[in-house]
Image (tube, helix red, strand yellow):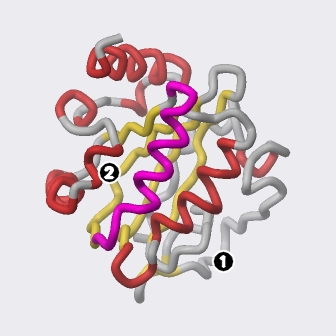
Amino acid sequence: MDSLEPHYLWRNLYDAADDPRSPFYEREYSELYYTQTIYDHYIHPQWDEFGSRTLYLKILYANYQRGFAIIEMLGEWNDTLYNDIMYLKRNVAEALMEEGIDKFVLIGENVLNYHSSDDCYYQEWFDEANETDGWIALLNFRGHVISEFEACGVDQCFLMGGRLNVVAWRTLSPEILFDRLEALVMKRLGG
């Protein structure tokens, strides 16, 4: 897991550590020292810790004028033991929403497992984003993780599956990626 680093090709366009509106503003990273772990596996030091013990993320891009953020995730999404959704909602999503972000793209290729609890924070996040015509899209999550979301009913809070699960996002700029996703989302929402 230590070789899985967040997508870095957009770093010249956006860096959350340099963004005063980001919850990770002025965070410092080491390229040499690996201190964060998921269970007994060290992870690349560029991932951001946000309160969870098993799930990390990186805000790859945020556009406040257009109201969207693209977030890559790594680890085990575990609401059963660690209430990861609470930390994600309170420490990341709410901070971004206070700055005008209401459209979230969560990239989940490296989310290895999901363990559910209740849906309160999911529903709250969905409702708050929806107040301003926002949405939360899951991009490229693994099939078994999507099945777990569906099994516990939190899938109703996300746009996911289908074409959202096969996007070659690394080959696009963040703005073009968002334009394409927004077109898919508007189709699904009937707009």
> Residue at left 46%, top 38%?
105
Compared with 95, 19 (above or below) is above
Please identify the quarter of the rendering in which residue 135 is found.
top left
Instruction: Decide if residue 90 is on the left or right side of residue 81.
Output: right
- Determine whether the residue tagged by mark 1 lies in a helix, strand or loop: loop
Q: Nearer the viewer, mark 1 or mark 2?
A: 2
Amino acid on which the number 2 mark rests in the picture: Glu
Kind of residue indicated by mark 1: Tyr
Please report the bounds of the magenta region as a residue range. Answer: 116-133
> Looking at the image, which residue sits at the far top?
191
Q: Nearer the viewer, residue 171 or 77?
A: 77
Relative depth, front residue between 155 and 170: 155
Q: Which residue does the image show at 44% across and 64% down from the upper left? A: 3
- Rendered location of residue 56, percent (x, y): 51, 65
Q: Which residue is mark 1?
A: 33
- Where on the picture, by quarter, is residue 167? top left
